[in-house]
Image: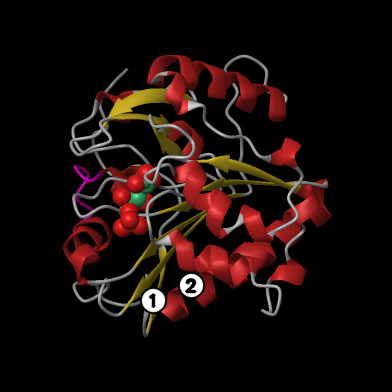
Amino acid sequence: MSAPTGPPAGARPTVRVLPDAAAVQRAAAEEFAARTAAAVRAHGVASVALSGGSTPRGLHALLADPSGPFRARVPWAQLEVFWGDERCVPPGAPDSNYRMVRETLLAGAPVPEGNVHRIRAEEGATAAALAYEEELRAHFCLREGAVPRFDLVLLGIGEDGHTASLFPGSAALRERRLLAIAARSPRPPLERVTLTLPVLNAASCVVFLASGTGKAEAVAAVLRRRDMSRPAALVRPEKGDLLWFLDAAAASGTPPGR
Ligand code: 6PG
């Protein structure tokens, strides 16, 4: 498997710069509601891969808010919830991505339990990645060698340009056959499970969310300099949409627009 070399093919990013983090969350909620509803109209189900970290918390709260404008628009009963990555910690641990999604989204939204596809990362990264791969293949009814096409993948970006648990210089960036693999983070929790680039780049739509000046350098490296050493720069859906929702602080190093 060759290492990522030049700019990947695939969708050019559409960048939306919004005034603040709350506006980013509203724009993302609108996209989430619209894309999931369209997916259910098109093929009866909406398969999403959610991001970890802290950025999605506000988006999740907006989507699940019973008095808000989005909850009634999301087809919760037909929503199939996956994760882009998980830390190898118990599902109830403070830094579990599952726990974050459970608390901020699923606790307030009527997603059937059978539609929640947790990465069982506490079982160890390699075993969990294998199990997750099997779950993906079963859910998407994949023949050998096929890649699932998520209707929507939500991603964040770290200050080093990582996304999901794909970190700079990681061997995981070169994986082209497996759908999910064990990965190692430079910061605790060290052991992770992550979707691979082929899965992210097969998505119908990828939405990156970034807020705050802490992300400005990484965002500029990806969107302005096309710095391929930043894993987020390698996410370019081949036949899908790529959207970046930034607040002014995160975009402070990046010209608005495409
Ligand atoms: C994780 C995420 C990771 C995250 C970025 C940004 O498991 O931590 O998948 O890729 O999206 O690190 O994190 P924040 O949203 O907390 O800034």
> Does dot 2 land on a helix, a strand or a loop?
helix
> Which amino acid, by three-letter code, is at mark 1?
Ala
Residue under the point 46% across and 49% down: 51
Q: Mark 1 sits on what residue?
A: 21
Residue under the point 48% across and 72% down: 25
Is 103 placed above or below 191 here? below
Q: Which residues are magenta?
A: 224-230
Q: Do tag 1 and tag 2 residues touch (Cβ < 8 Å)?
A: yes
Q: Which residue is at the front of the view, 78 or 119?
A: 119
Whether 103 is among the magenta residues is: no
Q: Mark 2 sits on what residue?
A: 25
Q: Which residue is at the front of the view, 124 or 51?
A: 124
Q: Quadrant of residue 55?
A: bottom left
User: Residue 118 location in percent, x, y?
Assistant: 57, 34
Q: Residues within 10 Å of mark 2 (few under 14, many from 20)?
A: many
Mark 1 Cβ and ligand 1 under 8 Å apart: no
> Which amino acid, by three-letter code, is at mark 2?
Gln
Mark 2 Cβ and ligand 1 under 8 Å apart: no
Q: How is the image coloured?
A: secondary structure
User: Residue 3 location in percent, x, y?
Assistant: 25, 26
User: Residue 230 location in percent, x, y?
Assistant: 22, 46
Q: Is residue 240 visible?
A: no
Whether 226 is among the magenta residues is: yes
